[in-house]
Amino acid sequence: MLDDLGVLDATAQAELVRAGQISPVEMMEAAIVRIEKLNPELNALVHPMFDTALDAARSSNLPEGPFRGVPMLLKDLTCHSAGDPFHEGMRFLKDLHWVEREDTYLAAKFRAAGFVFVGKANCSELGILPTAESEAYGPAHNPWNTRHSTGGSSGGSAAAVASGMVPVAHANDGGGSIRIPASECGLFGLKPSRGRTSLGPEFGDVMAGLVCEHVLTSSVRDSAAILDAVAGYMPGDPYVAPPPSRAFASEVGADPGRLRIGVLTEAPGGTADVHPDCLAAVEDATELLESLGHVVETSSPPGLGDPEYIGQFLTVWAGGVAWELDFWGRKTGTQVRQEDVEPLTWALAEMGRSYSAAQFLQALEWLQRGTRTFADWLAGGFDLLLSPTIAEPPPPLGEFEQPPDNPLQAIFRAATIVPFTPLFNANGRPAVSLPLSWNDQGLPIGVQLAADYGREDVLIRISSQLEQARPWKDRLPPVHA
């Protein structure tokens, strides 16, 4: 049984604990064995927390939640846990040996669900780049091909779940950081609606609502059940997504009905030529959806080709990076200097500082106008929008170089890979990446589906239907437990 745990999702592992077939301590010991075997090759974990995990598993106070005793990772960004290292991919915080004193609301909800934190996952510095290759901790490696990126910024989380180290890992998403690594590592990644999960108690929102929290999983049912455990308003939240009509887990296996689905294959903002492998994945998904009775049309909200989209999004993003450096300076009592961070981080912060408050608000106005355009398109009778998740197969490691004389090179390279995902951070709508295709090199190629605000239920129903029609659970990467 212990040898089989690496291929079981979190729901199945929790069922073994409830049935008394395995104890939480045995579950944790087996996870530690898997991590110690694979992490030297993948560098998915940057802070192992084995002793505290075993203590929690042995404790009589381990909560009787739906995932009691199941090991998980926290991404080392935004969501922190009491008494544990928290460095956000920054050499600045690593050198300070920074440790957080309290759980975020989300971490506390994970604990209440019964999860046990076994470590912190690798990510890019401050989650800026769509890879996990920070100067502070080095690159995470893709278990499908270790010379390639995991995607990011939740790359360590994705590598750990895809390789079977743990069945689930926390992730967050400010421009695609749940969906990008899901696509590149062959996982299911749901970015919830804005306000579905709390960022408190420290933050009301992050980057004017771009950032949201959830997990990376191997199954749709895990993602849905975990969303039930962590969603909902917390004191002081500035907004909250509309409550679902029933539990998200109830949507798994439910009939999605006959949906009308638009297709977008041209990169928003005109920043990329979409790779034939990614176009083929969308074509394949279209045929699969039509075979299930859905209507799929080449249609998308107007205005997505406007090149101004990238500039307006970058204005908000750069302003957010400037705020993050100032935040950490205030919190640690130590000013963040240029030499403390990567060249791109400093360049974006300087860009953000150059904007006026009026320019920042103008960017928000522009993005919100696009949100209403999207709403009008949905009101015309569409239920979902299908697109590539990213515009290329998983790139080789080292694609995001930051030369000191041109540090923004990395962010412009990123724009050519991930033009599709930021749309749904800007408009707050839920979106998923589904692992339905692999290319001839054996690399995963995800497709993205997006729904109207608050309609994770629609995404879970259609994702579950696709998972049943094209199961992916038995596709394991070469590097696997």
Image (spheres, rainbow, N blue to C red):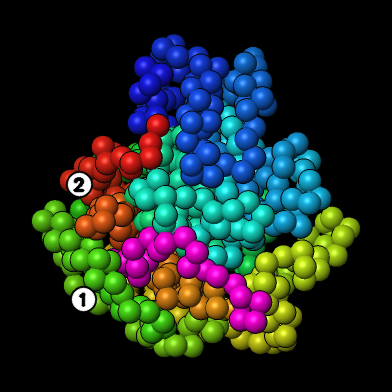
Give the left or right position of residue 49, taking residue 274 as reference.
right
Instruction: Give the residue pinned by disc 2.
Output: 470
Residue 140 visible, this angle: yes
Residue 89 within the magenta-colored segment of the rendering = no
Circle 2 packing at 10 Å, graded few (<14), some (14-19), many (20+), is some
Task: Report which quarter residue 383 is drawn in.
Answer: bottom left
Whole-angstrom CA distance, mark 2 to mark 1, is 23 Å
Provide residue 50's location: percent of width, then percent of height. Answer: 62, 28
Report the mark closest to the observer, 2 or 1.
2
For the record, the magenta segment spans: 386-407
Percent across and percent down for residue 304 are 38, 82
Callout 1: few (<14), some (14-19), or many (20+) C-alpha neighbours within 10 Å?
A: few
Q: Residue 436 in the image: x percent, y percent? A: 25, 53
Which residue does the numbered mark 1 point to in the structure image? 298
Question: In the image shown, does 398 or 247 lie closer to the viewer?
Answer: 398
Q: Secondary structure at mark 2?
A: loop
Q: Earlier in the sequence, mark 2 or mark 1?
A: 1
Q: Secondary structure at mark 1?
A: loop
- Relative to 19, residue 112 above or below: below
Q: Let me know if residue 393 is in the magenta part.
A: yes
Q: Residue at x 48, y 83 (%)?
A: 309
Residue type beneath disc 1: Thr
In which quadrant of the rendered view does residue 316 lie?
bottom right
Q: Residue furthest right?
A: 333
Q: Would residue 302 appear left or right of 403 to someone viewing this image?
A: left
